Image (cartoon, helix red, strand yellow):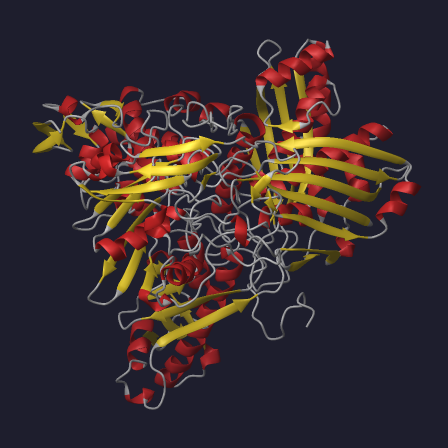
Amino acid sequence: MDGITPAAGRRILPAGPGKVVGRGVARIEDGPLLRGEGRFAADVNFSRQLHMRVVRAELAHARLLRVDASAARAMPGVVAVWTAEDVAEIPPIPFRATKVRGLEPYCQPVLARDRLRYVGEPVAVVFAEDAYRAEDAAEMVVVEAEELPVLLDATAPPAEFASGLDTEPTVVRKEYGEVGAAFRAAHAVIELELSVGRHSGVPLETRGAIARYDASSDVLELHGTAKKQHWNRDEIARLLGRPPNGVHLFEGHVGGGFGVRGELYPEDLLVCAAALRLRRSIKWIEDRREHFVATNHSREQHHRIRAAVDAEGRLLAIDDVFFHDQGAYVRTHGARVADLAAGMLPGPYRLPAYRVAGHFRLTNKTPAATYRAPGRFETTFVRERLMDAVANRLGLDPVEVRRRNLVAAAEMPFARPLDTLGTDIILDSGDYEGLLDKALARFGWDAMQEELAARRATGECVGAGLAFFVEKSGLGPSDGVRVSIDATGAVELVSGAASVGQGVETVLAQICAEALGVDYARIRVVRGRTDRIEFGNGAHASRVTVMSGSATWEAALAVREMALETAGTLLQLSPSELTIAEGVVCRADGPAGPSVTLAEVARRMGPNAPEMRGRTPGLTAERWFWSDHMVYPYGVHLAQLRIDRGTGAVTVERYLVANDIGRAINPVLVEGQIRGGFAQGLGGALFEEFRYDPQGQPLSTTFADYLIPTIAEMPVVDVLIAEDAPSPLNPLGVKGAGEGGTNAVGAAVAAAVDDALRRPGAVTSLPILPAQVRRMLDGAA
Amino acid sequence: MTARRIALTVNGTRHEAETPVRQHLADFLRGTLGLTGTHLGCEHGVCGACTVLLDGRAVRACLVLAVQAEGRSVTTVEGLAPENGPLHPLQAAFCANHGLQCGFCTPGMLTTLAEFLKDSPDPTEEEVRVAISGNLCRCTGYDSIVAATMEAARALREARA
């Protein structure tokens, strides 16, 4: 077993469009969402519920002296006000599995204890009979604190975090090859200093948490959850001293995830603790201002990178030192984003030697974690800026320098002596140069260059750029799916996956329908519920279609086999002579002849059917898919844009995302992921930034300050979905499609801005704001 | 807290209820009437998720007080299609064109576009883009919403012809 060669006997999804797989069918999720019958967090209500309001720190760094809640407690409708003393027994918020040791002292308490470390940190909570009264009372809580110097720059020398601990919890180091020798032998050494701004997922639905304790069954329920229910269940149970089977998490509709929703935050524990203690249901809904200061930030990194190249522009070595601005505490991801950045930086290129040191540093800002393409949006910007600089230094075409360095199709699978997320990086499949050629042709790259030259001749400031990327997806190790057919013929699929609105139910139903021979639109897909399946690894890291999709395929095939066997007995035919079409088992060689419905087969397999004596009844199967290695989608982004010389505004005119994802289960959903992902990447490239004043006061706390792209900023986007390199690591051949649209936008837009300015290397930071562009235009004049 | 009794028509049904004078219309619709289809994305009038029609005109329900709706007629996303009836052509076109992913901005998009297509039954794509330029969507990248709207406009014209 090498982890790459498929296990013998595994049934592979045949190539080409199937009956329902490979087709852009309508989503099964849409009905309630279109009619206003969805169930988002704020839509969950229980009788006798109390509303929680969080009192948040207004100073970025301070010694907490006293919290006086007496006035708030006396307000009408207020049931309780808690400060740190009231939750002293609840341990800090933990992080998920990581190889990095020593991060525990940097975890966040559910309510601030002795120090305030960022504006927005929860200090106290008010519980009141309605949300308006809770907010009134929260304003009456007096927080006395003594200001301390703030640290807002992750590249500055570390300061003291607590006695004996500084603000650099760890340095992520990876290295292979002879880095020093490569630099000594280099034809040229290129050095760049590059940074990516602080921005994040910012879903349209803010967070929410509604807890209810049912004393009659001794079960604590948490509603409004997302992404990672089973891990969160285990941790909530542990932190509150309950058995996991006495805690259940429920997922309704989720208004966008993007990495930030569904992590375990202080508010989740506070509503649970209050439901247990106050014996009332507790509802908390974050408001938008809170969201900007309380929900995970992401991205902010500063890189000092050097490359050694030979005379032909081939990479000999990369040496990168970067500073990751984690914000005030280590959250649930530990150092994962810095680890991903370090592991994924080499991207699609052959790289004989590599050394990286990622300084994971704390500052007095909202804590950070993952956001769509975490560590890759950042390092694709850095790496592709570097490739453009190599091209410029050696007088090569930017496309040519990439061709010379791309890992070739014949080299796949390509193992790098690197790991990330605890898995070895083995690029599983790909034809990088083939996709580059397809993308250039589709975009009309060469003809466009002439057109741009003509426009420049008339005084326009226009340019084009490209960036190549490698994504990672399908993080294991496991996920399970149970497929059942009941006595009426209804099919139910219970998964350990979650949905953040990306169409999980439709995709799993398509895979199930393909294997079973039923109507996908009538399959009930259960996800995000700990009371229906014991384990699950949730929805993140573009893993659901790979992991839960593969488990669905195998579970549905198992049910199919069971159905054919039972039907074969009933029809006195061999199972190999049978097939299933539209829910009916019939002869494979034609519709004529004997048949039996799946409902009848299920009845024959019911608990009281004589045939089931001594057997476990039910037309049902559960299968678990295991994966030791991630799969690596890849692609290229091409951008064409113009710059307004007066305002410095950048307008992207035309854009192509070419993305090989191995196999598209639903091409329209894939396209939606890529277009939506692109919009978010565009935000990070040109508009979105969490800004702070010198005292650490956040300046981006409304949608008027934090600018997410509207339709007015969206260019014409073309999407090229390639299926040239199916993954050998799963029976569907799929790789995740969630993050490729975002990954390379910053890099491609930066290259195109350079080109428009006719100043190679001009862009060194994201977002590229109009004021900076104007300065660059002045510099160019 | 000062409260006042108001009467208004929501989706064709007359309601009378007490509301604190400081309660905004979205909280009244969601909380007092239980119509949770209207979503709150920012409560400062930028995102457009809470858009409802007040006497046929699109308003941000987070920027209107419930008492301001006294005596007026409100249409929310729940009122676009008859209960248990077929989807409104806009809703059907959103489904057919994948005009939604998470669905959180969708109610505000639908109400905004319902008003727009009444005023502009035969719009250009550019006009559709302007019509939803005040509605944020974080999932789709908007193109599929434009496609859906063009299809719905066609369907509505054909239904009228």
Q: Nearer the viewer, residue A714 or A57?
A: A57
Q: What is the quadrant of the N terminus of chain A in the image?
A: bottom right
Reply above or below: A22 against A241. above
Reply above or below: A426 against A709. below
Q: What is the quadrant of the C terminus of chain A in the image?
A: top right
Decide if residue B22 is on the left or right side of residue A490.
Answer: left
Reply above or below: B16 against A101. above
The residue lying at 77 percent from left, 45 percent from top is A406
* Residue A253 shows up from this direction: no
Quarter of the image for residue A757 reads top right
Q: How many marks?
A: 0
Instruction: Estimate the x, y position of residue A500 in percent, counting from the top left.
Output: 42, 48
Q: Nearer the viewer, residue A420 or A323?
A: A323
The residue lying at 54 percent from left, 28 percent from top is A716
Instruction: Estimate the x, y position of residue A226 in percent, counting from the top left.
Output: 40, 51
Reply above or below: A166 against B161. below
Q: Nearer the viewer, residue A403 or A227?
A: A227
* Residue A162 shows up from this direction: yes
The residue lying at 77 percent from left, 50 percent from top is A408
Instruction: Estimate the x, y position of residue A448 in percent, counting from the top left.
Output: 69, 24
Q: Nearer the viewer, residue A744 or A51?
A: A51
Instruction: Estimate the x, y position of residue A730 in percent, counting from the top left.
Output: 58, 63
